[in-house]
C-alpha cells in the first residue's frame, strides 16, 4: 500500500476514494477500522471511513489512531486525514484534536489543512473558505444543525482546536509552485511543529500542494487535496497506472432513496424528486420520538410501492423546525433517532428486493451502511463531483450512492438512478 486515508465520515470517504481511483490508483474503502491489516485486499490506497465527525473528540482521536495503526500495519507510506470541504467542526474539534494526535504519532514536523474542492465550489483564499461566491459564514452552513460554521477564517477556526500554532500559506506562495510551498511550511515549523492553512482556488493549486508534500508523512484536508498525491508515487516508479474511467455493473432490483440530511441541497433534491412523481414518505420526528412511528410503519407503506419507480423516505426539514426538535429532544438524540430509523428501513428494503439505494447525508449514510452489514465498498462511476456509485463488497448485494448532504445537482436523486438503466 502507498497511501492510507482516514475519513471522518462515509460519504467523505467515497468522495476521496473516487478521486484516487480516477487518478489511477487501485482503491479499497473499508467501513470502520479493519479488524486486521492482513484482511485488506491488495490496493495502492485504502480509505478507512469512520463516523467521527461529530462525536466526542477523545473518541474521534481514538478511532483515528486505530485506523492509522491499521493502515501503517498494511504498509501505508503516507497518511491523509480527510474531512469535509466545509470544514465542519466546533471549537473543541474534531479536526484539530485528530490532526494533533496523528502528527504526534507520525512524528510530522508540519502538516497542511486545506478543505478546498473547486469542482464543488469550495475554495480557500487568504485563509477564508468560500462556498461558491460567498463566505462559509454567509452560506447555509451557518445553520448546520450539528456544526454551524459562523466564521470563514480557517486559521481562526482551527486555532482553538489545536495545541499547535496555525499559520497561513497564502495564494501568492501557492502560485509560485511546490518549492515555494515547501519553504513556507518549513518556515512555519522553524520553532516546532505547526499546521498551515493553505490557499487553493483551482485544481492546479491542489496539485501544487500535493507535489509539495511528496514524501511527507501526513496531510489533512478535503478530498481535493488528494488530487496530486498519486502522481508523487508515479514519479518514483511506484505506481504505473494512469487516470482511467471506472466501470460498474449494478445488481438488478428495486430502487429507493433515503434522505436524512437537512441541507439546502438535499431539500431541493427531495422537492425535485417529488415534483417528478416519486412517491414520498416524510418522517415526523415527534411521532418517532413518541414511538407512534416505527420502521415497520414505513416499510408497510414502501413495500407495496416498490416497482418501476423509486420510493423516497425523508426527514429533511427547514432549519427552524430542526432547531425546535433539537431543543425538545437534544441535538445528538434527535439525529440518532432518525439515523437508526433509516438504517432499519434500509435493511427492510434490502430484504424486500431493493438493490439500488441512494442515501443523502453523511451521518445517515454511515448508519445505513452499518445497518446493511457492509464493511467494504468498491468504487464505481461519478454521478456528480464528489459522489460515485459504490458496490457493497459484502453484506447485502446492493449498489449505493452515498451523498454528502451539501453535494449534488438538484436532480441528483432521479439522475443517479437513471445512470444505472
Image: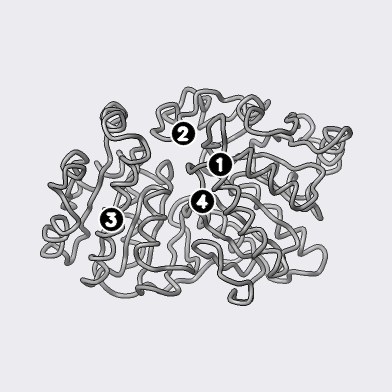
Q: Considering only vertical position in the picture, is 77 above or below 85?
A: below
Mark 3 and mark 2: Cα distance apart in space? 25 Å
Instruction: Give how far apart the Cα atoms at labels 3 and 1 are.
Output: 32 Å
Real-space Cα separation, disc 2 to disc 4, in angstroms = 16 Å
Give me the disc on residue 57.
1
Depth check, mark 2 against mark 1: the one in front is 1
Residue 142, quarter of the rendered image: top left
When asked about the image quadrant of residue 245, the answer is: bottom right
Residue identified by numbered label 2? 147
Query: What whole-number distance in Å separates the C-alpha atoms at marks 3 and 4?
Result: 19 Å
Which of the image's four quarters has the N terminus?
bottom right
Q: Outermost residue, front direction?
A: 58
Gap between marks 2 and 1 measured at Cα: 14 Å
Residue tagged 4 = 12
- Side of 334 relative to 168 (left or right): left
Q: Which residue is mark 3?
A: 257
Q: Residue at x 60, y 72 (%)?
A: 36
Q: Is residue 33 left or right of residue 357?
A: right
Amino acid at each position: 500500500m502507498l497511501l492510507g486515508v482516514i475519513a471522518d465520515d462515509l460519504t467523505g470517504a467515497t468522495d476521496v476514494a473516487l478521486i484516487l481511483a480516477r487518478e489511477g490508483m487501485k482503491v479499497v474503502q473499508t467501513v470502520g477500522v479493519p479488524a486486521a491489516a492482513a484482511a485488506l485486499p491488495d490496493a495502492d490506497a485504502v480509505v478507512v471511513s469512520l463516523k467521527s465527525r461529530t462525536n466526542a473528540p477523545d473518541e474521534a482521536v481514538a478511532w483515528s489512531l486505530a485506523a492509522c495503526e491499521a493502515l501503517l500495519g498494511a504498509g501505508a507510506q503516507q497518511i491523509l486525514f480527510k474531512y469535509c470541504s466545509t470544514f465542519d467542526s466546533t471549537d473543541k474539534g474534531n479536526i484539530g484534536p485528530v490532526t494533533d494526535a496523528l502528527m504526534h504519532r507520525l512524528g510530522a514536523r508540519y502538516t497542511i489543512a486545506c478543505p478546498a474542492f473547486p469542482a464543488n465550489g469550495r475554495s480557500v483564499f487568504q485563509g477564508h473558505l468560500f462556498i461558491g461566491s460567498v463566505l462559509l459564514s454567509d452560506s447555509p452552513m451557518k445553520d448546520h444543525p450539528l456544526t454551524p460554521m459562523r466564521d470563514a477564517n480557517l486559521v481562526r477556526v482551527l486555532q482553538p482546536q489545536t495545541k499547535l500554532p496555525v499559520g497561513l500559506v497564502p495564494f501568492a506562495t501557492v502560485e509560485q509552485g511546490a518549492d515555494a510551498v515547501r519553504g513556507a511550511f518549513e518556515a512555519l515549523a522553524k520553532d516546532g511543529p505547526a499546521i498551515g492553512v493553505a490557499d487553493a482556488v483551482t485544481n492546479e493549486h491542489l496539485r501544487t500542494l500535493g507535489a509539495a508534500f511528496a514524501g511527507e508523512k501526513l496531510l489533512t484536508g478535503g478530498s481535493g487535496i488528494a488530487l496530486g498525491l498519486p502522481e508523487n508515487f508515479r514519479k518514483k516508479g511506484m505506481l504505473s497506472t494512469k487516470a482511467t474511467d471506472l466501470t460498474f455493473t449494478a445488481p438488478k432490483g428495486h430502487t429507493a432513496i433515503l434522505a436524512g440530511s437537512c441541507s439546502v441541497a438535499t431539500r431541493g433534491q427531495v422537492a425535485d424528486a417529488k415534483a417528478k412523481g416519486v412517491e414520498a414518505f416524510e418522517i415526523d420526528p415527534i411521532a418517532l420520538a413518541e414511538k407512534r412511528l416505527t420502521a415497520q410503519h414505513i416499510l408497510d407503506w414502501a413495500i407495496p410501492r416498490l416497482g418501476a419507480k423509486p420510493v423516497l423516505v425523508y426527514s429533511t426539514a427547514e432549519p427552524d423546525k430542526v432547531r425546535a426538535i433539537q431543543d425538545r429532544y437534544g441535538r445528538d438524540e434527535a439525529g440518532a433517532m432518525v439515523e437508526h430509523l433509516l438504517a432499519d428501513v434500509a435493511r427492510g428494503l434490502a430484504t424486500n428486493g431493493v438493490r439500488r439505494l441512494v442515501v443523502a447525508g453523511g451521518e445517515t449514510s454511515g448508519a445505513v451502511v452499518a445497518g446493511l452489514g457492509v464493511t467494504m465498498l468498491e468504487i464505481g462511476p461519478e454521478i456528480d463531483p464528489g459522489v460515485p456509485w459504490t458496490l457493497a463488497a459484502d453484506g447485502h448485494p446492493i449498489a449505493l450512492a452515498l451523498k454528502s448532504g451539501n453535494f449534488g445537482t438538484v436532480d441528483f436523486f432521479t439522475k443517479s438512478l437513471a445512470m444505472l438503466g
